[in-house]
Image: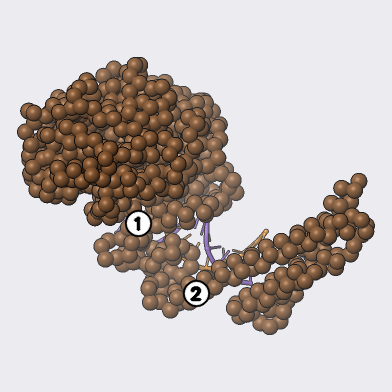
Chain colours: A brown, B orange, C purple
DNA sequence: GAGTTTGAAACT
DNA sequence: CAGTTTCAAACTC
């Protein structure tokens, strides 16, 4: 198998690690009433948290960070002490967790399987929260621990433990600014739309969401005051990567983990909010990191992006972090200032590592997220969706090292070592998996993996191509990786590498029963969740992309291994195509991978969507390279801009372009296209009506036929049939008129349409007679 | 359905 | 980087 070249390898980390584009707009509080939780479903069925499955990191750290001191409050799970906050899924009452050391207490409300952690701006806010709900519980920080007890059906409690912060300098400082700041929860839909909701006293006013849509709860700390108490999440499931080199000192520290569905009878999971004493945390860049479970409520998602925390804060950036609890995503957003919010989540214990996790990195504008999509029950697989890229990347986090691997036995209580909050999974292997286009990622009918078993054993696991032998879930030892998987060594060595896996495999993973937890957990699968992770394809909406199945290719000479082939260009295998000598399939993975590498060597952007976000002031969608049309006037589908239904931009090098806003030709074309579409719809409707009328008539006349024994076709020509037929003819006439057909031609078309109608009537009549005869026999 | 046109991709 | 060739889709008849 070919190993991804260093060039490609160098590309992949950037793809994954780059989170600069992930910027969440500050969303004003849209619901000051404090509605913090939206039930994902109208019913009260609790959604269990997945905790028994292996998870890269069991630790979730919520850190309160003083801007200058980088102080982080950590919830450690090592021991359960003082106050414990229990959140029951059944209860929809907000729970307020206040910490003396924390400038802003956290309001925690759980309802309908959702837990919202909110940082209460002030004690008054706490009181308000209490007043809002009599059952609100304020937990002093002394306890440093709060227990989420019944998030899942299993009732497995999740313990959030806060270490004593008496010695933490940043705590008091943070609390002092809490009033000025208005920490808020932002409920963010997967599609990127965010809904900011104050948490305080919110539970009573919960608005049940009709659809099982995953919500992201975002905690935003907009104030830039150094005294502010930025919330710092440190997700410590880190792997070494070059992406965090000094060059990219601002690379976000990721490594998140996500809580998902718990199988019943699971030991209490402890989420540790540890205070990182490591300076690396301090230097952690403030880029926004969104960790969201886009999948079913039963999923636990973990984001692990960077292994090392950049030591420089040269580029303070907003750092939104979504921590998904069950179906919810907790987002912590920190404005780009002196005290950026930081999220630290340690994955030091890869207990119960969730099998397949996906991370979607939004590529469109700043509102995109890296989302984690749990795909499989097998641990250590993360699907990373990089908007703007046609590949999906799957990161496999292996528990090869004892320290990094989680102890799967016993209650999943993991604690983060303060001194090494970010060192979690040194043996992690990141896999970059070109799958399907991110936008087209969708749940489809499950089908077993049919690939031949090709397992490559190697002394250098991170650089070997692993071929999946069976449809079994991905194993940590990579023995079940799909064919075509290529491991690329991480630059600079280390235990981290990338593996390029055929896109379809991820789809297959998603389709595999092993992947879908809902199938086995008894919870209804939420197909919509995954769709939420989809991102626009070439500027098209998800609905557009999903509603348009890709056309089969007709390649004859390229073997479907060049970008001429749309299938290949989209990172897909050929399927039901008309190509000849196709190598874009599982049987030719070696060649395919080589071709991918070649394309990437030639153009690292080769597999990225051509239609992306334009510059400020320009159209939202524009061709990344611009077209070079010379003869088509950019008004035919030869033009990639026109084909994408966008206008040419300044970067186009086209000649005689007519594809601009004020172009009369373009307007005419658009008008004609719209008219044609309307005509087609009308004609289709008319034909459907005709068929319906005929069918209805057949139903009514069937007894007559059967008894009378032989009616002529004209018997079926009733008033309704005539009307439907006339509609078809009129529509045909309109179409001919609009297309400026000569009268003779128009008459011909009308007559032909009439003939078609007659044929349908006769055919239906004959069929009805035949059916009746067969019935009588 | 065959042939032509077109422009992106690939190549030199 | 520019020019040429190759290629497959779009288009026309």
Q: Position of residue A628 (x, y in %)?
A: 39, 64
Q: Position of residue A630 (x, y in %)?
A: 42, 69
Mark in the foreground, 1 or 2: 2
Q: Classify the position of the N terminus of chain A by image quarter.
A: top left
Instruction: Check disc 1 and report its element: helix, strand or loop.
Output: strand
Residue name at image x 40 percent, y 47 percent:
A208
A563 left or right of A549 in image:
left
- Circle 1 packing at 10 Å, graded few (<14), some (14-19), many (20+), is many
Dot 1 or dot 2, earlier in sequence = 1
Discs 1 and 2 share one subunit: yes
Residue name at image x 53 percent, y 44 percent:
A574
Q: Are marks 1 and 2 in contact (CB under 8 Å)?
A: no
Residue under numbered circle 1: A612
Q: Is residue A603 visible?
A: no
Of all chains, the one bearing label 1 is A
A472 left or right of A214 in image:
right
Q: Is residue A711 visible?
A: yes
Towards the viewer: A500 or A587: A500
Q: Which mark is residue A488?
A: none
Residue name at image x 45 percent, y 41 percent:
A43
Tell me how many marks there are: 2
Q: Position of residue A381 (x, y in %)?
A: 38, 31
Residue under numbered circle 2: A671
Q: Is residue A116 above or below residue A197?
A: above
């Amino acid at each position: 198998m070919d190993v991804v070249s260093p060039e490609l390898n160098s590309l992949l980390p950037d793809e994954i690690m780059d989170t600069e584009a992930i910027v969440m707009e500050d969303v004003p509080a849209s619901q000051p009433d404090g509605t913090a939780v939206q039930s994902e479903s109208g019913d009260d069925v609790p959604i269990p948290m997945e905790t028994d499955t292996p998870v890269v990191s069991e630790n979730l750290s919520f850190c309160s960070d003083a801007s200058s001191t980088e102080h982080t409050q950590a919830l450690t799970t090592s021991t359960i002490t003082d106050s414990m906050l229990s959140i029951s899924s059944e209860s929809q009452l907000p729970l307020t967790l206040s910490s003396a050391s924390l400038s802003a207490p956290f309001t925690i409300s759980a309802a309908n399987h959702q837990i919202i952690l909110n940082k209460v701006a002030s004690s008054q806010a706490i009181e308000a929260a209490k007043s809002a709900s009599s059952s609100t519980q304020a937990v002093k920080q002394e306890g440093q621990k709060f227990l989420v007890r019944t998030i899942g059906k299993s009732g497995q409690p999740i313990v959030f433990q806060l270490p004593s912060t008496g010695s933490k300098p940043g705590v008091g400082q943070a609390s002092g600014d809490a009033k000025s700041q208005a920490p808020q929860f932002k409920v963010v839909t997967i599609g990127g739309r965010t809904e900011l909701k104050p948490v305080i006293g919110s539970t009573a006013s919960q608005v049940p969401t009709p659809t099982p849509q995953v919500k992201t709860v975002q905690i935003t700390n907009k104030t830039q005051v150094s005294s502010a108490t930025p919330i710092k999440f440190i997700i410590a499931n880190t792997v070494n990567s070059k992406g965090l080199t000094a060059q990219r000192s601002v690379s976000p520290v990721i490594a998140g983990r996500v809580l998902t569905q718990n199988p019943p009878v699971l030991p209490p999971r402890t989420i540790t909010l540890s205070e990182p004493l490591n300076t690396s945390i301090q230097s952690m860049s403030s880029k926004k990191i969104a960790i969201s479970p886009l999948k079913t409520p039963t999923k636990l998602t973990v984001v692990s992006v960077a292994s090392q925390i950049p030591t420089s804060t040269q580029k303070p950036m907003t750092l939104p972090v979504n921590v998904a609890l069950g179906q919810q995503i907790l987002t912590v957003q920190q404005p780009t200032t002196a005290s950026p919010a930081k999220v630290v989540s340690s994955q030091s214990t890869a207990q119960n590592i969730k099998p397949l996790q996906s991370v979607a990195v939004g590529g469109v504008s700043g509102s995109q997220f890296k989302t984690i999509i749990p795909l499989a029950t097998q641990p250590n697989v993360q699907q990373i969706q990089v908007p703007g890229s046609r590949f999906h990347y799957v990161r496999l986090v292996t528990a090869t090292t004892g320290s990094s691997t989680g102890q799967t036995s016993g209650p999943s209580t993991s604690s983060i070592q303060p001194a090494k909050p970010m060192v979690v999974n040194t043996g992690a292997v990141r896999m970059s998996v070109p799958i399907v286009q991110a936008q087209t990622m969708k749940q489809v009918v499950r089908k077993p993996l049919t690939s031949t078993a090709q397992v490559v054993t190697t002394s250098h696991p991170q650089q070997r191509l692993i071929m999946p032998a069976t449809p079994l879930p991905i194993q940590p030892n990579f023995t079940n990786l799909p064919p075509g998987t290529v491991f690329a060594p991480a630059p600079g060595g280390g235990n981290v590498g990338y593996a390029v896996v055929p896109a379809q495999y991820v789809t297959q993973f998603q389709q595999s029963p092993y992947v879908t937890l809902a199938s086995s957990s008894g919870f209804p699968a939420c197909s919509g969740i995954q769709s939420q992770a989809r991102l626009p394809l070439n500027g098209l909406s998800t609905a557009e992309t999903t509603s348009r199945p890709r056309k089969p290719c007709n390649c004859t000479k390229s073997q479907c291994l060049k970008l001429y082939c749309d299938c290949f260009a989209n990172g897909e295998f050929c399927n039901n195509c008309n190509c000849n000598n196709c190598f874009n399939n599982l049987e030719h993975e070696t060649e395919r991978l080589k071709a991918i590498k070649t394309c990437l060597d030639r153009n690292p952007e080769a597999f990225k969507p051509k239609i992306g976000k334009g510059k400020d002031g320009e159209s939202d969608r524009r061709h990344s390279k611009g077209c070079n049309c010379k003869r088509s006037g950019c008004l035919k589908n030869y033009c990639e801009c026109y084909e994408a239904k966008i206008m040419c931009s300044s970067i186009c090098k086209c000649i005689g372009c007519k594809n601009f806003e004020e172009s009369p030709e373009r307007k005419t074309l658009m008008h004609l296209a719209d008219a044609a579409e309307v005509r087609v719809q009308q004609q289709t409707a008319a034909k459907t009506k005709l068929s319906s009328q005929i069918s209805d008539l057949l139903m009514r006349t069937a007894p007559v036929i059967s008894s009378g024994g032989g009616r002529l076709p004209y018997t079926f020509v009733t008033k309704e049939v005539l009307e439907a037929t006339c509609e078809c003819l009129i529509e045909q006439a309109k179409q001919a008129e609009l297309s400026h057909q000569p009268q003779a031609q128009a008459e011909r078309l009308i007559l032909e349409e009439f003939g078609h109608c007659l044929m349908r009537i006769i055919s239906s009549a004959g069929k009805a007679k035949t059916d009746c005869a067969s019935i009588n026999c």
